[in-house]
Amino acid sequence: MLRSNRLGWIVGALIVVVIFALLAAIASRQAPAGQESDLVPGEGEILRAEVEEVLEEGSVDQGEFEQPYQLLRLRITRGALKDQVVDVDYGVLGLTSESRLFRPGDKVLLERIRTLEGEDYYAIADYVRTGPLLWLTLLFIGATVLLSGWQGVRSVLGMGISLVVIIAFVVPQILDGRDPVVIAILGSIVMMGLSLYLVYGWDRKTHVAVAGLFLSLILTGLLAVWSVNWTRLSGFGAEEAGFLQLAGVELDPRGLLLAGIVIGALGALDDVAIGQSSSIFELSKANPRLGSGELFKRGMNVGRDHIAAMVNTLLLAYVGAALPFLLLFSVYAEPLGTTLNREIIAEEIVRTLVGSLGLLAGVPLTSLLAAFVARNRMPWQAGDRIEEV
């Protein structure tokens, strides 16, 4: 056991070092210094720059309010125009606040646009957040490994697998025009199957969790299709769907909405499935005389407590994501019924309710499978090694 823990710590440390090296390599990529770009009128590019000096600071009268304003001197640090110095107005166009004002040493994304007259126009697009995001990622990985040891290492690897599946399979398949719901379900099964087996091992407890997850995802997908059709949602409640259409991406926005509902419920379903399966198998080990019916009943007692917390978690996650829109509608103070009928709000309601229904179904489905498998194939009957308590 000591050797296993020590191996887990070593592997965990190696993973942290490898991830840090990869992220650092990605963050350090830059265009060759001094190389002129071949922008044509109407084209643009994103450069990186650092604020050298605040030349001027004040406010601009915008009628009903005053807009904070700065004139900044920037040195381009990455990109085709590296080491060139440019002066940029910030705050003249668009809304900003004092919290978004810049100081010397701040690193920014600088947008360079070639105008129709052949001149270059510069505008600050945003802060450079690569460093803080990198350190937050490393903090998360380190805390996970520190608290969970070898299992934490496998959890981080499982998270990486999920990201790879989404980026390398789900997104390209949807962009190629395939059914987003089918792709979301298949990708979710692959993600959670690999992650669950990686973290919890190849045993009957994990088999049951994957089977329960599979059935719950199918039911969630069917409920999502029915609910979206019934509520007449178009999929354009989120402005990102409109941006994809403008970008020339041909896809079904309703299908994209359905895929988002399925994947959004996946994390909570994963927790429910493995939690129910583990609880029932532990009950069967603790009391081998319990029958399938009794195991199912006691597993449901655990599941009711579990699902109450999961449904609330899912609700708060969706409400948190839609909070700015809720505030916006509250400011306009229209009737509640009208607000609820707005598609952007109705989408979040459907996401929450369908995801919660999927969770509700996942508890009895997984519990039923686990109770049957644990009762009919006990470890000593299958010739497996019984763990000592």
Image: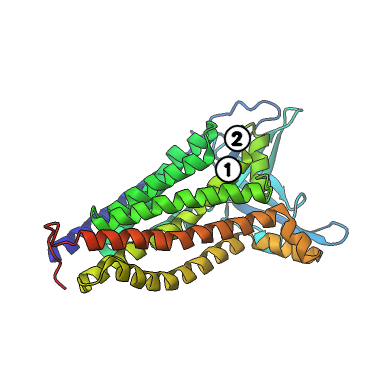
Q: Is residue 9 left or right of residue 91?
A: left
Q: CA distance from mark 1 to mark 2?
A: 8 Å
Query: What secondary structure is marked by label 2?
Result: loop
**Mark 1 or 2 closer to N-term?**
2
Q: Which residue is mark 2?
A: 251
One can see residue 211 in this view: yes
Q: Which mark is residue 231?
A: none
Q: Position of residue 226 (x, y in %)?
A: 59, 48
Q: Residue at x 48, y 63 (%)?
A: 360
Q: Quadrant of the N terminus?
A: bottom left
Q: Position of residue 166 (x, y in %)?
A: 45, 44
Q: Between residue 31 and residue 199, name the one nearer to us.
A: 199
The image shows residue 76, relative to residue 91, as above or below, that is: above
Q: Which residue is mark 1?
A: 256
Name the amino acid, label 2.
Answer: Leu
Q: Is residue 60 left or right of residue 160?
A: right
